[in-house]
Amino acid sequence: FFGSIEDILNQPEDVSVRNLAVLRAKSLTGDIQRLTSRVRTLQADTNDRIIATADEINGLLGDIADLNVQIVQIEAGNTSGSDAVGLRDRREAALNQLAEIIEIRTSEQPNGSITVFAGGDYLVFEGTLRPVKAVIDQKGGLGIGDIYIESSNSPLDTNSGRLGGLVTARDEILGGFLQQLDDLSATLIHEFNKLYTSGQGLVGHDTLTSEFGITEPSAALDQVGLGFSPVNGSFAVQVLNTQTGLTQTTDVFVRLNGLEDDTSLESLTAALDAIDGISASITSAGKLVLNADSANVQFAFSDDTSGALTALGLGTFFTGSGSSDISVSSVVSANPAKFSASAGGIGVDTDLAVQLAGFLDRPLESSDGATLAVLHDRMIANTTQGSAVAKAVAEGFEVFQQTLEAQNLAISGVSIDEEAVRMIQYQRAFQASARFIQTVNDLLNTLVNL
């Protein structure tokens, strides 16, 4: 995209070159929106799995509670003192499945039942269970689900287990990447438009409507909740008479000092309407509309130090406020000749295009002097580094798990070698017993025959 702006410097009068820059911008914004959509889909799928976990946990808690009751009944009424081995094996399997989902602690009671804890809360006590539920909260257009204990309405501890991994993936990994991408997109929109709105194209505008509306036109512009807040400053309006070739430049001041005379949409509209050659009005949706008073009049902007044009979305190149809605202005898309490349007047030079072409490496005040290229590289580095760390941690835990399983098998498992030796011992003992019995039988037969 920025390379295509450089091409304008070589052929400033060629509208097709400016159109190529617009097409490159559309490709860029389309890629950002598609990436955002893909990540949001992954986040939504992960969120659905978290919500479904509540039913899975409740099913296992119910099984453990039922098995507790059966084990206590069988072992309490068994005078031989033998355990309900089969039921205990089933309960152990259910506990293992539950431990894969959430972190639990267990304590076996004297009567043979198992009490299950998660954090500081108990989930199963003898035959009683405390079911969990999924609580949905709308955040960023997605119904975020978290698991709570129904009886106390307190969040379930999700620091580890499969549930903890899903929550981390949804909120920190996917959510963190979306936040970084959204911040990068917002910076691109805001900073690029701040520079772009101070320039002019090969032709000016005959009509223009702001992108963002204001519900309180009488309130100060920095107090109405605009996505990009303007500051105290000014901008110039250039009115070109195409018949005479004369340009009239008028400075419009934006006062935002926290005083009673702070600029509002109403006062800004009045100041613009007072300029010869154009008229200004406010729509019912709170949007500012500018119109040329005659067919031979065109207007443009320059030297915006207030950011008011960017905040209102007036004469900007990028539209939207973040990665999900970033796009290219329909005004410049419909007429690429309006692409702002000049800094000295409508169709005068390409001084602004020089600055726009180097925007990728331009230090940005809103990012503490970091460039857009640095912000992009930082986002990529955070993502790749996070992936590498997550993979290393997963591999480490996998090795640790295998070690614990080996130790567990060494204690409770069956050794094939030991069992084979024992089988041979029993076989030889049986053979010796059989030989002894046969010998005694032969001796008895001999004695009887005598």
Image: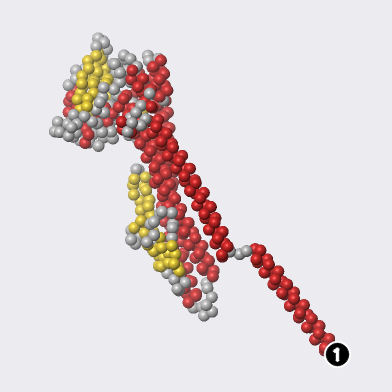
User: Residue at horizontal 74%, vertical 74%?
Assistant: 431
The vertical placement of 174 against 58, above or below, is above
Residue 354's image quarter? top left
Q: Residue furthest top?
A: 244
The vertical placement of 292 against 129, above or below, is above
- Give the structural element (helix, strand or loop) at label 1: loop
Residue 287 at least partly seen: no
Q: Residue furthest left?
A: 260
Counting the numbered discs, the total is 1
Q: Position of residue 155 (x, y in %)?
A: 36, 56
Task: Give the left or right position of residue 405, taking residue 153 as reference.
Answer: right
The vertical placement of 162 against 289, above or below, is below
For the N terminus, the quadrant is top left
User: Residue at horizontal 52%, vertical 55%?
Assistant: 401
User: Residue at horizontal 27%, vertical 21%?
Assistant: 302
Q: Position of residue 251 (x, y in %)?
A: 20, 21
What residue would you read off at disc 1? 450
Q: Residue furthest right?
A: 450
Q: Position of residue 413 (x, y in %)?
A: 58, 64
Task: Give the left or right position of residue 426, taking residue 118 as reference.
Answer: right
Residue 161's image quarter? bottom left
Q: Position of residue 108 (x, y in %)?
A: 45, 69
User: Residue at horizontal 17%, vertical 28%?
Assistant: 267
